[in-house]
Amino acid sequence: MKLIDGKEVSSAIKEEIKKEVSEIIDSGKRAPHLVAIIVGDDPASHTYVNNKEKASVSVGITSTVYKLPANITQEDLLETINFINNDDEIDGMIVQLPLPDHINKDIVINAIDPSKDVDGFHPMNVGKMVTGEDTFLPATPFGILKMLEYYKIETSGKHCVVVGRSNIVGTPVSILLSRKAYPGDCTVTVCHSRTQNIKDFCLQADILIAAIGKPNFITEDMVKKDAVVIDVGTNQVKSDKTKSGFALVGDVDFAEVSKKASYISPVPGGVGPMTITGLLLNTLKAYKMKG
Ligand code: GUN
């Protein structure tokens, strides 16, 4: 079994981004600038945004975080987005999800200028991804592609089973891996909470991507020998082994499945760091698109 080390892959890519950003600054131009908007006080969302901010700064990307109260009106949030859309010195913008219930996520995502949508969530960018046009790929699926590429994992003709159909991970990664490309050219099956006999599908997977949000959902008996297993789960579970009383676990029973897999990504230290790297790559792309 080989470990798919997201920290190693993300460090290598961040080094390349850092070099490119420092060349931009040395040439007298301003640094790329990413803005993150966070609404409310969900602790997990604040941790994610803090990590995005730290990673941006570590590669020389300017980072601004707008921390907005949970009771902000949708109108005021849209006004903030519009203000950022019109600021020529901001290249990329993300609105951290989930949003409070009184705010319509789709209206918010639609308000982001597609040329600044470094999450790749705007329907225009989703459409471009589906038709294979150059665009911002959603950060987590983008990070998964980069991991497969780094380890030179063969994907052509392989059966990839994706467990989960979210707009953020399951659906886009299934589209990307079926495209005529490397990584890609897979035969893809998407399973979800209503799939019957899910184990039978998982057992057919050469590449198994678990993004269903259920701790240790994928057990050893669901995995074919020598499969490549990518764990996208970020489940907070109670633990007496950590100071906080919580631990982060994936969707895969790592201890047992790792005995069978040819490659496996751990949680933490697998897909998580790659998600942020995907966002940084998109921010640099947004900057360069402006010419
Ligand atoms: N919430 C969970 N994942 C993401 C992500 O990739 N981007 C944003 N904006 N919110 C998220």
Image (cartoon, rainbow, N blue to C red):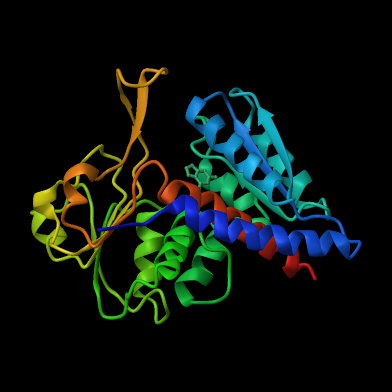
Q: Relative to 80, is 159 on the left or the right?
A: left
How many numbered discs?
0
In the rendered image, is residue 1 in sight?
yes
Residue shown at 47% from the left, 58% from the top: 143
**Closer to us: 148 or 48:** 148
Q: Relative to 82, is 112 on the left or the right?
A: left
Q: Position of residue 275 (x, y in %)?
A: 50, 51
Q: Relative to 27, is 95 on the left or the right?
A: left
Q: Position of residue 69 (x, y in %)?
A: 64, 24
**Closer to us: 242 or 173:** 242
In the rendered image, the vertical position of residue 40 relative to residue 174, given as above or below: above
Which quarter of the rendering shows the C terminus? bottom right
Residue shown at 75% from the left, 60% from the top: 21
Tell me the quarter of the picture where residue 152 sits.
bottom left
Q: Relative to 281, is 24 on the left or the right?
A: right
Q: Position of residue 7 (x, y in %)?
A: 48, 50
Which quarter of the rendering shows the N terminus? bottom left
Residue shown at 65% from the left, 38% from the top: 37
The residue most toward the right is 28
Tell me the quarter of the picture where residue 65 sits.
top right
Tell me the quarter of the picture where residue 229 sits.
bottom left
